[in-house]
Each structure stands twice: as C-alpha cells, then as structure tokens.
Image (cartoon, coloured by chain):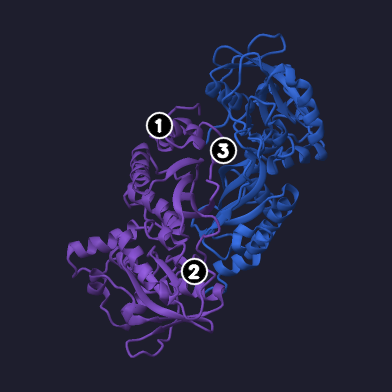
Chain colours: A blue, B purple
Amino acid sequence: MAPGEKSGGRRGEFQLIAELFAPLARGATGAFGLKDDAATIDVAVDRELVATADALVESVHFLRSDPPASIAKKALRVNLSDLAAKGAEPEAYMLVLSLAPWIKDDWLTRFTGGLASDQSEFGITLIGGDTTATPGPLTIGVTAFGTVPRGHMLRRAGARPGDAVFVSGTIGDSGGGLAILHGDGNSLSSEMRDALVSRYRVPQPRTRLGPRLTHLATSALDVSDGLLADLNHIAEVSGTRIVVEGQQVPLSAPLRALWGSDVDAIVRAASSGDDYEIAFTAPWSEKGAINAAAQAAGVEVCEIGHVEEGEGVALLGLDGRPVTLGRLGFTHF
Amino acid sequence: MAPGEKSGGRRGEFQLIAELFAPLARGATGAFGLKDDAATIDVAVDRELVATADALVESVHFLRSDPPASIAKKALRVNLSDLAAKGAEPEAYMLVLSLAPWIKDDWLTRFTGGLASDQSEFGITLIGGDTTATPGPLTIGVTAFGTVPRGHMLRRAGARPGDAVFVSGTIGDSGGGLAILHGDGNSLSSEMRDALVSRYRVPQPRTRLGPRLTHLATSALDVSDGLLADLNHIAEVSGTRIVVEGQQVPLSAPLRALWGSDVDAIVRAASSGDDYEIAFTAPWSEKGAINAAAQAAGVEVCEIGHVEEGEGVALLGLDGRPVTLGRLGFTHF
C-alpha cells in the first residue's frame, strides 16, 4: 500500500505519523519532526539520564472497551510513575505501537488526544518510536526518559535498618476499581464507584513528589505489583526486613466503603497492585523534610512502618501481631 | 503465582529475569543488575545519545518456526542497523517482551543465547525492559542506544543536488530469502538458498561502516522499506530528487540466480525491503574517503546514482531511461 492510502478505515503508516504523531513531537529538537530513524537526547552536564520501559497489552493491562484516551494515559503514566519513583524529572518518550485490526482512525485520534493532554500535564514530549500491525491484541510499548541530579537516582537498594517506611496517596483503589468493573460494589454511590474505576484506568504518577525525594529517601519504587510485594522487592535488594503496620496503610473512603477496613481489607488493598504510588524508606530524622516535600508536591505521604535487620516483609494486624500472608501481589505470568 | 514458581513449562517473571536476563546486563553499571525499575545511561561530554525503537511481531516480521536465536538477533539487529545508519556506535538496549502462550523455557534459553552472542559481536549490553504475557503473537520491542560525536548524527535530511548516492552490501537478498521460504527457488543450490534465507533471518547491520561516515555523508538511512522507498524518504525530507542507475544496484550472485539481472529483477530487489544496508549521499569529492571507510569496515560500498533538483526518486533502466515504478516498497499497513 502506498503512503497515505487508506485501508479499512485506517490511515497509512506515513500519514498516521505525519498527521497524528508528528504534532506530539513539536518542541523536541532531537525528535527531528519524527522524520528520521532515530532521536537524539541531550542531558545537562550535572544531570544523568534515567530510562524505563513498560508495555501494556489489551486484555492483560486494559480492556478494549476502555476509552482510548485513558489507555494512552495509562501507557504513559505507568512509565512516568517509574521515573517519579526514581526521582527523575520527565523529559521525553518513545512509543512502540502494535496496532490490532480493530483499531480505526477515530480510535487513534482519541488515543493521541490522550497523549497530547498528558504531555502538557507532565512536561514530556514524544521523540520517536515505531508503528506496526499485529494480528493479535493491541500492544503499547513506551520507553520513557527523565533526568536526575548526577548520581542521585533513587534505587530499590539502600533501605537501612532503623529507616522509616513511607507511601504516597492511598493504596488499593485501583484493585477496587477493577473489582467494580468485574461487577462488585453495586451498593456504592456512583461517585465512589467512579473514583475507584478512574484510579484503575488512569494512574496518578507522583511526578511532583519523586524529584523532591532524591536527597531524602534511601530507597524507593512505585507500587505496581502490590504494596507488600513491592516492599518485599526493596527488602530483598537492600538485604533488610520491612515491617508494615496494617492500620497505617492509607485506604480511601471509597475503598473502605467497598472492602471495609478490617485486616482482610488491608491485606487485599496491599496486595492488589496497580497503585502507582511511591513507596520509600528514609531515616526518621528526615520526617520533617519529607512532610514539607509532600506538601510542596500536593500529595499525602503516610509513615506505614520501619526497616529492621532480617529479610522479607511482615504486615502487623490491628493487634500488633504479624498477619499470615499468602500471595503478596501480582506477577505477570 | 509466586515468584520462581513454574507455570506450563515457563519460569516465573522474577526467575526469568534473574536467570536469563540479568546475565546479559553484566558490565553495565547503569543496569543495576536488572534489580531496579529504571536504568541510567551515561554519555561522554563530547558525544550525544542516539535512541531508536523497533518492534517485531510474530507472523508479521518473523515466523514462529524461525530459530529463537535468529529471532533474537533480528530484533536486536534491525535496531543496530538504525544506529549504524545514523553514524552511532552501539552502547545499550532495553527489551520489551510480550510472551505468547506457546513460549516455553527452552525457547527463552535459546532466545537469550542469541542475544548474548550478538551482545559480544556488536558491543552492546542489556540495561532494562519489561516482560509481560500476551494472549496474542510474540511481540518483541527493542529500544537501542548509541552515541555519535556531538551534533553529528547522520540524518535523512541533508542530501544536496550534485551529491552522489551510495549503498553498502547487496540489495534484495532478504526479499529473495523470504520468496524461498514461500516455496520459490527450487532450482538453486542449497548453498545459494541458505545464503538468501539467512539474509532474511539475520540482518547484517553495518555497525563498522556507519560511524566512519559521520563526517563524510550528507544524509543516510538504513534500507528497510526497500531501496527506492527509502531513497524516496531521503529525497522528500531533503527537498531533492534522487536518480538511481538500475545497472549499478548491487545484486548478489544467489539473487541473480533466483531472479535474474534484468530490469524486473532490479526493480523487485530495490522494492523488496529488509536489506538493512546503509544508503547515503555524499559529495563526489568524498569518494576516496568513502572507499577507504568501506575498506576499513570490511564492506563493499557501491555508487548507484546522484542527487539533483526536483522531487521523488527515479530508477534508470539499462537503456538509461526512467522505469515506470508502482509500489516502491513495504509499508506496515
């Protein structure tokens, strides 16, 4: 098929790039208007480039019936969340689209509209990528780039016995939203249901908080597999044990309406994943500075536990005794 | 499923990363042993980072029956080819795998074996990525990083009237290899058939040539859509016309045995794509330096035409008159 021709209600490859994607690359000199095979990325001398990649697959990470703009935002935001948790300021991204046969022009227009909206909100620009056809599910790969002060990327390794454990926002809302999409929560108000579903569909990456933690936190990651599973990642790589006080895990009002607030609800929330909050450790002495950073970023940060000698992660119930945990969170297969 | 558990003959996500992928990240300090959510990329002050992304989809870009190591190499090499054509020295890559249900441990071991082999050959290291499951076809996304002398990335834009047009290696072999896999060429010797099929399965990125052209070529790209289609990209972005002399297009002996060497064979070869050679333009005055660069890189470079005022691409037949061209090459949908 020649460039620009239409096939089954979808623009040709080159027309798609010129009309829908090139406008998203305006302002990035290294993107060359998406008219080249590669992009250049410039990094200031006192900063360091941070790169992260995450793919979303139809039926695995989103539903075909989800609004196209939401799918676009989710694809971008799961990567922005990784950058935020590493303390990085977002800069640019590359998009690799494998387009399923059901994708039409109208869908793509709404998808790129979602990208445009998030580019403005988060100060990130498209600089390149690849678009291909697939006979299978829509698959969206994003590689996102950010920068941190040289040598100060927040890592999973670094938690030290005596540190406090913190988490931003609330935990479990996304899992609750998915449960609602699967038919739960009919007794909740539509406002509460919408609040939870929107947390599942469109994560809120903590890009204003993360960069403020680069000189405060000893370790950090974004909560995607589930709070307990992700804290277990920190514990493992840091060679420490993490103890979480169940009653300190922040649950939103809609989630408490859906699942309650007993220990089962806390375990469920802390295992359900897709939260895209930042979990981190820091010395107790930094607590004032962390509260100030949270306030400046406009997000709540809760102290939920501590780091000690040992290994693994423990969740203390309301009686202060460890809860027996099964599956900690989500793995992809 | 807990980390490390097996499911249907495949390692769990974390075990897969630890056992098969982490060894590929050894030696890259910014990869943090693949135990973090992001990688850092360091670039020397006098150089510039070049990034490119390409995805391969089962049944679209490779066949399920292709050897796993070949699929791995092709996924890496199509990106290495982009870097080479931009004049970049390869440095690192990120891998985004969407694993189909039919992928088992043994397949993954052979796949990562192919990556390991190419990492040694091309001096590139895995620094991160993402692994997820898909109910659809195996999809492999690679984002590759290289560096060029600051400000010297070879671009598609830059061809000037009076420049000569060059191409490395031979053209059409990969298309011939695919034709053989579809049943053509039964009269050819098995050596000739294998030579063409291996060019389809495993491209030879010209990583030794590209970086030698950064101060010689005025424009460059790698031939993936088809020689004529790709030269048309250069013509379009450079605002010039490119004229190719058909009899100068380099065809290999096996391809001539398969398709002949008349004008139809030349058009077919120059439209079939997946060559992963470097096509570039340069002033006539640089011809000696280009020959020296080709010799140092150990690859043939042929002069195949010239750049003039105007637009589009023309192919001259053996009589020196323009051939009427239909479809110039491959588009993805």
Count of labels in the image? 3
Q: Is residue A175 left or right of residue A327?
A: right
B67 w.r.t. A36: above or below: above
Dot 2: element: strand
Return the mark for residue B19: 1
Q: What chain does badge 3 belong to?
A: B
Alpha carbons under labels 1 and 3: distance apart: 19 Å
- Same chain assignment for discs 3 and 2: yes
Question: According to the image, label 3 marks what residue?
Answer: B38
Using the image as rendered, state which of residue A175 and residue A240 is in the foreground: A240
Q: Around disc 2, counting alpha carbons within 10 Å, would you say few (fewer than 14), some (14 to 19), or many (20 or more)?
A: many
Q: Quadrant of residue B100 in the image?
A: top left
Using the image as rendered, state which of residue A178 and residue A220 is in the foreground: A220
Alpha carbons under labels 2 and 1: distance apart: 42 Å
Q: Type of residue at label 3?
A: Ala
A141 w.r.t. B216: above or below: above
Using the image as rendered, state which of residue A217 and residue B285 is in the foreground: B285
Of pointers 2 and 1, the one earlier in the residue sequence = 1
Q: What chain does badge 1 belong to?
A: B
- Same chain assignment for discs 2 and 1: yes
Of pointers 1 and 3, the one earlier in the residue sequence = 1
A262 w.r.t. B282: above or below: above
Q: Type of residue at label 2?
A: Ser
B211 w.r.t. A153: above or below: below
Return the mark for residue B219: 2
Q: Around disc 3, counting alpha carbons within 10 Å, would you say few (fewer than 14), some (14 to 19), or many (20 or more)?
A: many
The image shows residue A243 at horizontal and vertical percentages of 64, 15
Instruction: Answer whether residue B31 is visible to the viewer in this image.
Output: yes
C-beta proximity under 8 Å, tags 3 and 2: no
Of pointers 3 and 2, the one earlier in the residue sequence = 3
